[in-house]
Amino acid sequence: MISPFNNDDDHDDKPREECGVVGIYNDPEASRLCYLALHALQHRGQEGAGIVAATRDGVLNSVTGVGLVSEVFNESKLNQLPGSHAIGHVRYSTAGQSMLKNVQPFVADYMHGRVGVAHNGNLVNYERLRRELEENGSIFGTSSDTEVVLHLIAVSKKRPLIARIVEACEKLKGAYSMVFITEDKLVAVRDPYGFRPLVMGRRSNGAIVFASETCALDLIEATYEREVMPGEVLVVDKKDGVQSYCLSQHPEPKSCIFEHIYFSMPNSIVFGMSVYESRRMFGEILATEAGVDCDVVIPVPDSGVVAALGYAEKAGVPFQQGLIRSHYVGRTFIEPSQGIRDFGVKLKLAPVRAVLEGKRVVVVDDSIVRGTTALKIVRLLKEAGAIEVHMRIASPPIIASCYYGVDTPNSEELISNRMNVEEIREFIGCDSLAFLSFDSLKKMLGGNSGGFCYACFSGKYPVAPNGNVNKVVDFVDDGLNGSIQSIDGGWLQGSEDQGQDLNHEEDN
């Protein structure tokens, strides 16, 4: 019997990032550069993509679609997006079902103009905010938490627009790295904890670029300048250039450690650190602390490659590609009428018998979530002739769900929450199993270790920020074209180079 289309959840047994965002200001090819940058961020979301561009006469044009960037956009679609300012988004849904109406960026008309937004993260108080807005008459067109942000901006009485954005953000709890576009401005905002990454770069023609990762900057030949700091608002326009504001007094950052373990591309700089170097060091630590006699070290491609290189180099054992990944298999496929064991994994990962047969194999992966994929991989390797399979995991055991923009199963489904290491080893059938030690991970991060969120490893979630965002006084005009000159509550303009926290400075 032929089964219905299968989501292949076993092979996608990984935490999944919600999305990636990009914003480009003052480049005549803004929408095309957005398109390229979204290609570089495709690993952050494959369910939908969109671009919004601002024309010279202030119109915001939008093209969104379900599927990969290359499936959504073509020359005709990009021709519908003229203008020198644009924002873009690729998504994997964590909040909101996967459907066209939930594909970002979102654009909204309200009393004082139009605004578009692209959001990476997850709002933990989304349901309460939506209920309050609906009780006051708001009508929602999507099931995405991002739409709440637009409603909060629309109902705000503050002026100018930057004040509306700030008032909206003071009501949000959770993770948000967002880019906004209006007829003449680009705004980038990062939550006070800095859960999700957001960086700023500049092209040789002076165009400002924001993106979730530096790999997007590299592709469009923008020079990385710095991170958007946790709790920072960056406003870009032609009149004032880049202005930096402090969103709120914020606690110690809690950036997502899984960006370095799995989500980000190895060629990216994330949270000021090289992802490649982090993963290589994870592998070295495993080889030092959990080494085993073996003949060959192989990765689970693609996310285990760099850690496996680090392990092999430190252990002095040959690194080989014992598993070959097919890059031409989508998330859905029709299963064969005859039951083939481990069909989904075999479709995507092919063992190399010449590397494995008669060998003691160390296989390095980035994480174990439910354990179902690890079980099938071990079985695949032994069927290909490996006489021993030793699994090494380049992260600590995942014992808790994430609420900050990462799609993880419920805690009850997480194998490390239900079993100890020996029980997991027996379940997946390998000869030995070791995880990266939590203490060793923090030691490797050194003085930066306090700036990361480890909730998925510890079950200890960062506490929501206390206090309110500093207030900005009302302005005479709405501020879509206005400037920010009267500031109240400790706000000051900051240097675009320093991006410093000026909350404690006196107003002038």
Image (cartoon, helix red, strand yellow):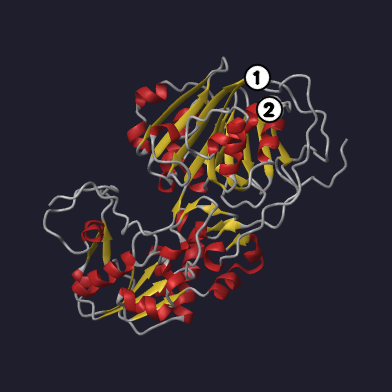
Residue 176 position (above or below residue 427): above
Could you tell me which residue is drawn at 78 percent across and 33 percent down? 472
Q: Quadrant of residue 239?
A: top right
150 with respect to 479 (left or right): left
> Which part of the image, by quadrant, shows the C terminus?
top right
Q: Which mark is residue 22?
A: none
Query: Residue beneath label 1, please?
Result: 112
- In primary-sequence order, the first of circles 2 and 1 is 1
Q: Is any part of residue 85 visible from this angle?
A: no
Q: Quadrant of residue 363?
A: bottom left
Give the farthest residue toward the front: 135
Identify the secondary structure beneath mark 1.
Answer: loop
Query: Residue beneath label 2, please?
Result: 161
Residue 51 position (above or below residue 192): above
Give the farthest residue toward the top: 57
Mark 1 is surrounded, within 10 Å at the Cα level, by few (under 14), some (14 to 19) or many (20 or more) other residues, namely some
| Picture coordinates of residue 150, whole percent (x, y) | 59, 31
Which residue is more in the foreground, 352 or 16?
16
| Picture coordinates of residue 55, whole percent (x, y) | 53, 19
Identify the secondary structure beneath mark 2.
Answer: helix
Give the farthest residue toward the bottom: 293
Mark 2 is surrounded, within 10 Å at the Cα level, by few (under 14), some (14 to 19) or many (20 or more) other residues, namely many
Q: Could you tell me how many numbered marks the image carries?
A: 2
Q: Gap in Å between the C-alphas at discs 2 and 1?
A: 9 Å
Could you tell me which residue is drawn at 71 percent across and 44 percent down? 499
Amino acid under disc 2: Leu
480 with respect to 310 (left or right): right
147 with respect to 167 (left or right): left
| Picture coordinates of residue 335, whole percent (x, y) | 18, 52
